[in-house]
């Protein structure tokens, strides 16, 4: 392969370097295109063919169904690591030693308290407020209680900011849910592991002890790992471009939460449950809805099947399907919604139409099933996604700042009116 790409515009040729990634991905470096050509730009709506950065964090190959964090396969990490180990790996580049992991968790626990005035902000929201809006607001508000900017050239300051948000974010998540249910706010227990404490803070009732369920801990641990990072998606790119203005970590994360809120991104697992509810209200006939999904003239869309990146089976779905089966078996949940979900899954895996098009159940399908079985309300599903994605956002923000990347400033192709003189209001 040549080390240059040639572009011809109006009879004049321009050469641009070809860059090869560590997994042999090929990119054309066009950062000098506009300057060299006197103003020519590329246009790529949705940035489907545009690399916004170089990154050493996550590798994704949708055609082959590969997802790796820092070189480690998602399959091995989900089987052998816990969420806090994966968070450390994503943020700092290597799996922690036993001592490093202990210190990391210890430092996080030191910051597992939020300023009491944050409760006043939470109290100002009505119970009807969507949890994602509440979470974005509370995360941004943390900046007011930690106003000093992070010196990104100081490893100590960077580390302190990271453990601070990892300590406080689960509290905001749990409080957001407890507010919705009118439950007293809870800080959990410093004697618990990271994931165990999340469940404790979310579900502990004031008048009874909370008993941990190892199967639920394992399922949530896996869900958080599977959602921890996913390359340059909408919310991650939002975190990076917000941070490129040298906005702080907390406010950059808040921007990412807002981007994640959309139904085409993090809201997909909520959309799955809303679809299942609609099918139930219409009698629960899964075969009818499978037929509707195959009818190109029918506006119905089957949520939670296929993936815009993975052209084969979503590797995360393979892992979480086993956890979903285990959770449903252990809890023995009698829920017609979950019965409908299992019916759709069975038919999609056996129907030739879906098999041929590789429209397999994806991670959003199974995560929604698990969260519902655990007793997490539908509107909290995207909040749980944000909880899992937190270390990925942090690692992407940290990488962007440490590499001193320039402020994000996409170009545009203007298609509006050309110059026209101003008309006095009496002549309009």
Image: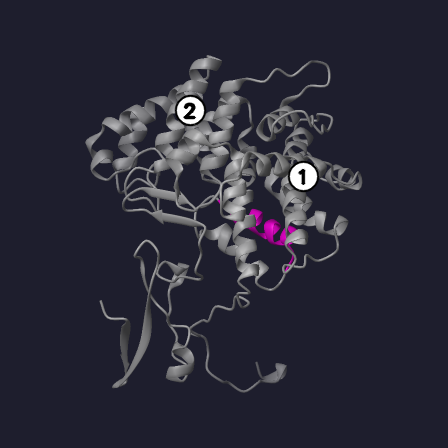
State how far apart marks 1 and 2 are (Cα).
30 Å
For image coordinates 47% across by 52% down, the residue present is: 234
Circle on res. 276: none
Q: Position of residue 127 (x, y in %)?
A: 68, 33
Instruction: Name the residue carrying label 2.
Output: 323
Tag nearer the camera, 1 or 2: 1
Residue 14 percent location from the top left of the image = 30, 81
Direction from residue 69 to residue 16 in the image, left or right: left
Magenta stretch prevailing secondary structure: helix
- x 53%, y 37%: residue: 97
Residue 379 is a magenta residue: no
| Residue 250 colored in magenta in the image | yes
Q: Nearer the viewer, residue 351 or 77?
A: 77
Query: Nearer the N terminus, badge 1 or badge 2?
Result: 1
Which region of the structure is painted magenta?
247-262
Numbered label attached to residue 107? 1
Looking at the picture, tell me which residue is in the foreground, 96 or 287.
Answer: 96
Quadrant of the image containing the N terminus: bottom left
User: Residue 424, relative to residue 256: is it above or below?
Assistant: below
Q: Point out residue 322 in the picture as x, y percentages from the top left corner.
A: 38, 24
Q: In the picture shown, does residue 287 fall above or below 60?
A: above
In the rendered image of this protein, does residue 346 appear above or below residue 209? Answer: below
Residue 263 can be seen in this image: yes
Residue 5: x and y in percent read 28, 73
Other-residue count near label 1 (Cα within 10 Å), few / some / many at <14 / 14–19 / ≥20 = some
């Amino acid at each position: 392969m040549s080390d240059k790409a040639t572009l011809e515009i109006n009879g004049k040729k321009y050469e641009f370097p070809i860059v090869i990634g560590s997994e042999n991905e090929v990119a054309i470096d066009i950062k000098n295109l506009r300057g060299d050509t006197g103003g020519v730009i590329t246009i790529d709506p949705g940035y489907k063919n545009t690399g916004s950065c170089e990154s050493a964090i996550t590798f994704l190959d949708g055609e082959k169904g590969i997802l790796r964090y820092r070189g480690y396969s998602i399959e091995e990490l989900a089987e052998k690591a816990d969420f806090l180990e994966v968070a450390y790996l994503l943020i700092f580049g290597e799996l922690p030693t036993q001592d490093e992991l202990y210190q990391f968790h210890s430092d996080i626990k030191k910051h597992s308290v939020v300023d009491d005035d944050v409760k006043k902000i939470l109290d100002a929201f009505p119970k009807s407020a969507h949890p994602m809006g509440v979470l974005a607001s509370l995360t941004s508000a943390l900046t007011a209680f930690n106003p000093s900017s992070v010196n990104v050239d100081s490893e100590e300051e960077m580390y302190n900011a990271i453990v601070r948000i990892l300590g406080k974010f689960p509290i905001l998540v749990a409080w957001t849910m407890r507010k919705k249910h009118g439950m007293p706010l809870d800080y959990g227990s410093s004697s618990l592991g990271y994931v165990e404490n999340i469940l404790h803070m979310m579900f502990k009732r004031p008048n009874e002890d909370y008993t941990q369920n190892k199967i639920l801990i394992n399922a949530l641990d896996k869900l958080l790992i599977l959602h921890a990072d996913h390359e340059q998606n909408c919310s991650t790119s939002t975190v990076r471009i917000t941070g490129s203005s040298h906005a702080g970590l907390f406010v950059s994360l808040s921007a990412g939460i807002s981007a994640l809120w959309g139904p085409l991104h993090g809201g997909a697992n909520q959309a799955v449950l809303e679809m299942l509810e609609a099918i139930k209200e219409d009698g629960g006939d899964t075969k009818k809805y499978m037929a509707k999904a195959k009818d190109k003239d029918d506006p119905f869309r089957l949520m939670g099947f296929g993936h815009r990146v993975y052209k084969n089976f979503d590797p995360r779905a393979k892992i979480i399907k086993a956890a979903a089966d285990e959770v449903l078996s252990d809890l023995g949940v009698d829920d017609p919604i979950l019965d409908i979900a299992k019916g759709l899954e069975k038919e999609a895996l056996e129907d030739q139409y879906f098999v041929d098009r590789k429209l397999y159940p994806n991670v959003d399908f199974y995560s929604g099933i698990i969260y519902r079985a655990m007793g997490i309300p539908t509107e909290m599903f995207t909040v749980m996604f944000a909880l899992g994605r937190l270390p990925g956002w942090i690692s992407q923000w940290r990488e962007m700042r440490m590499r001193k990347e320039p402020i994000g400033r996409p170009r545009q192709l203007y298609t509006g009116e050309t110059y026209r003189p101003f008309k006095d209001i009496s002549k309009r």
